[in-house]
Image (spheres, rainbow, N blue to C red):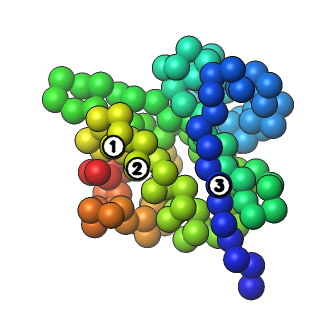
Amino acid sequence: MVEYTYRPSLLKSHEILDKWQILKPHIESANEYSAGEMAPFDMALLAMVEKAHIWLTVDQDDNIASVIVTRFIQQTRRKTMLIQSCGGSIGGWAAWGKQHHDTLVDFAKSTGCDSIQVWGRKGWERRLRHIINDAGHSYELLYHVYNMEI
């Protein structure tokens, strides 16, 4: 049995172009399921001007497990961190959910967010329903917008 461990890192704006060739296929694969709001390089440009964030997660063998793009949605009374895109090949979802997702929750909290959202297809429901944060909250389906209070 493989022991999965994951190391997520938030890329700095100057690292994005240097790593673009390894990031691009993962962002493109996730983007195939979008409504076409943004092209993959649009997300990279937003991250380079610090209006989005690109997270690179590697597994125990230093293989890319996931590339995630997040951004903030500021509303009058709430700030939400949106998981805009998630692409990759994650072998151990339970380990990824604990190790990487906790990093996202900590980042969202430290930046004043009230919740994390995933806008995605119905298939995300089976992956997200098992993730519970330290406050005991899990993602709830809101018309295929999944929301977790943090």
The three-letter amino acid code for the residue at tag 1 is Lys
Residue hosting label 2: 105
Residue 140 on image: x %, y %: 31, 57
Tell me which residue sits at (75%, 64%) in the image: 60
The three-letter amino acid code for the residue at tag 3 is Arg
Residue 116 or 16: which is nearer the viewer?
16
Residue 60 or 41: which is nearer the viewer?
60
Please give left or right for residue 99 compared with residue 67 in the image. left
Please give left or right for residue 114 compared with residue 72 in the image. left
Residue hosting label 1: 109
Residue 1 in sight? yes
Please give left or right for residue 140 compared with residue 19 in the image. left
* Distance of label 2 from label 1 (alpha carbons): 6 Å
Residue hosting label 3: 7
Residue 106 on image: x %, y %: 40, 48
Q: Secondary structure at mark 2?
A: helix
Callouts 2 and 1 close, C-beta under 8 Å: yes
Instruction: Name above or below for residue 137 compared with residue 18.
Output: below
